[in-house]
Amino acid sequence: MSTIAIGQAGGPTAVINASLVGFLEGLDEHHTVYGIMNGYQGLAENDLELLEGGMLHWVLSHRFVPGACLGSGRFLFTEEKISQAVRNLKKRDIHTLVFIGGNGTMAALQKISHEAKAIGYELQVIGIPKTVDNDLAGTDHAPGFGSAARYVALSTRDISKDLEAMRNFEQVRIIETMGRNAGWLAAASGFLKQSETDGPHLVCIPEVPIEQGQLLQQIKEMVREYGIVTIVVSEGVTLKGASQVKKAVVQGRSVLGGISKQLEDIVREHLGLNARAEILGMNQRSSIMAISSQDQLEAYETGKKAAEILKAGKTEVMVAIQYLDSIRYTSILEDCPLEIVASKGERLLPEEFISNQKRYFRWLKHLIGDNIPSYPPALRRRMIDENLYSGSK
Amino acid sequence: MSTIAIGQAGGPTAVINASLVGFLEGLDEHHTVYGIMNGYQGLAENDLELLEGGMLHWVLSHRFVPGACLGSGRFLFTEEKISQAVRNLKKRDIHTLVFIGGNGTMAALQKISHEAKAIGYELQVIGIPKTVDNDLAGTDHAPGFGSAARYVALSTRDISKDLEAMRNFEQVRIIETMGRNAGWLAAASGFLKQSETDGPHLVCIPEVPIEQGQLLQQIKEMVREYGIVTIVVSEGVTLKGASQVKKAVVQGRSVLGGISKQLEDIVREHLGLNARAEILGMNQRSSIMAISSQDQLEAYETGKKAAEILKAGKTEVMVAIQYLDSIRYTSILEDCPLEIVASKGERLLPEEFISNQKRYFRWLKHLIGDNIPSYPPALRRRMIDENLYSGSK
């Protein structure tokens, strides 16, 4: 009966295709569905493809594949392009628009809805949450985050083990995670830590700018205590008074990255220790090596929920996950008005999680998923042989 | 009866502890075994610990844990320190020395053996192979490589999928793998590639220096053809006429890294495409996310084989894996004289594998291990929409 268009926008995740598949599988058969190619750019440029036959089959085969099979992307959505987008929808008689994405995607959906209203075109818009940064408001968490958090936690534990073995060569590793303004991912790095001697020893998040002197003092003390220090920093962390470290500016958007390298230089210069910066990179958002089964499932279910919302006729809403019980994990899917998502802005790591790590990890537990083997305890004696760290000033 | 010392040297791997455990479990109970702390440094500085009781139990619990639980490291082994090492062995009446490591480790073992002979001290030395670079001669391959190759192949496939989705924002990704002089790991990146359109599209190995003009031409053509290009480079790759890109020099050893960033800059400047360098980093040698079960098993078995060699009384040998049949994978463990390991030098990717990728992958198949889901084919139509790549000159 009705004609629908669905797109994927922003940075892909390891599970964003599961949401697309969940939505398609949640629809009744009498719908006509277009896939929007390459995010909002495809909508503005009328690059849509009918999801039927072989093409539909191909899309559905992506449930467990990372990336965004329709093509995603970043796109500067001007007034003119928004009105072009609505004209393109009208041309094909599409009255429902669904996008899977983060903050920017939800804001754009709302603008499109307003433009449609302004020209008197009936358009239902529905958002499906997706972000590895977990900075989307209106939902307890967003699909994509759990798997990224798992990747960060596993990487931090293993890179720390490696550093522990190499302590006569290197003393400090600085692991840089994603997280433009919110520290959810970096803070997840300690999830598998079993004792004080295990890494990460320090975690820096964008919510709390770094005091250089204080950080250096902590590193010095920890190297004396443990022999090594594994530090985890979000890409968006700043040194107090400085701005975010950028790698490049592309299409008006800053690509962050490099704070770990800056800290590496500071540690070398001020402490004379051998430090190494490590950027965890694109694997955080795309690797199937660390898929959380809970995250995969929720990605699929939020997509399916969007199909329900569609049938219920609601508009200007985003699917939201509400966390009910953190002991025996239960959650329900709801819808949250896009206006609330927008008005709340970027969701930072709340104070209660910053000041109480245990509470954060209790919340995180079910999203990261299980089946992670634990390691034997670090042998403390071997960690404090001071002769090895004579390089430390 | 006899007293033995065992150590781990060089960069750790995800499976080096399995070799240690294999060796210990292969010994008869009447041996006294010392663990050498932090590689050759511990031997020179007499930092050995008796592996018995709680300490032995603790070491044995590391079979599936990455890093090197005794401590590894890099150490400049001078004549003076070698003779000190032999004196330390003599003091404790240790007549068998076993080290798990790569080329440098095997060369050091031989020097120690020569020094012992020179002073008339009876010393049996045995090497257990370990390297993620796979550049160790005398063995078909070394434990540690299979898991690292698996990590590289999985990462390349997923990062390519991510790039495919982001092609209106980024066109070129340059993934940097380990591999100081040998291209085994970088060449493994294409193992999961199913069609021409999948990444990696270009692979650069140290055995073949890059011709800048030719590389830029290939990238240009491939972006026109596929919309994106995923390039994989070993850290040791050079631009023709230039030297290796170094990150730092620590304790006289160059830490390589940065060729991907150099290529990123060249691509931006000459082709005006948005490129991003990605260094896969320490996860390659330490992540349990991509453990190859075959590699894990072989690491353990090579350790056990060392215990057999010990009982057979052989000296100045390294455990070697001989590949018998590439169809139905079978291999046997042998011993190879350290002299041969040293004389053959670093084992580069052979010409037959450089020129015939299929042959290389047939060899690699069993080391990377199975249980990797395949992906649906790339949809070629979406890859060649030229409008999207107007940034390309």
Image: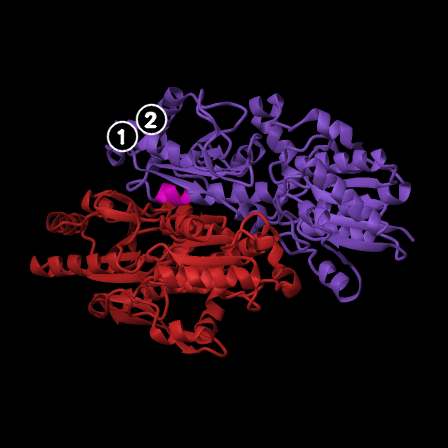
Chain colours: A purple, B red
Residue A142 on the magenta span: no
Badge 2 or badge 1: first in the primary sequence: 2
Find the magenta span and give its range. Answer: A160-165
Specify the farthest residue to the right.
Answer: A1
Task: Identify the residue at image location x=42%, y=42%.
Answer: A278
User: Residue tagged by mark 2?
Assistant: A220
Mark 2 and mark 1 residues within 8 Å of each other at the beta carbon = yes
Residue A162 on the magenta span: yes
For residue B50, side relative to residue B215 (left or right): left
SS of the residue at dot 1? Answer: loop
Residue A232: % across, % down: 46, 34
Q: Residues within 10 Å of mark 1 (few under 14, many from 20)?
A: some
Q: Nearer the viewer, residue A238 or A48?
A: A48
Residue A78: % across, % down: 67, 37
Identify whether B295 is placed above or below B250.
below
Q: Nearer the viewer, residue A100 or A249?
A: A249
Q: Residues within 10 Å of mark 2 (few under 14, many from 20)?
A: many
User: Residue tagged by mark 1?
Assistant: A392
Which subunit holds the residue at mark 1?
A: A
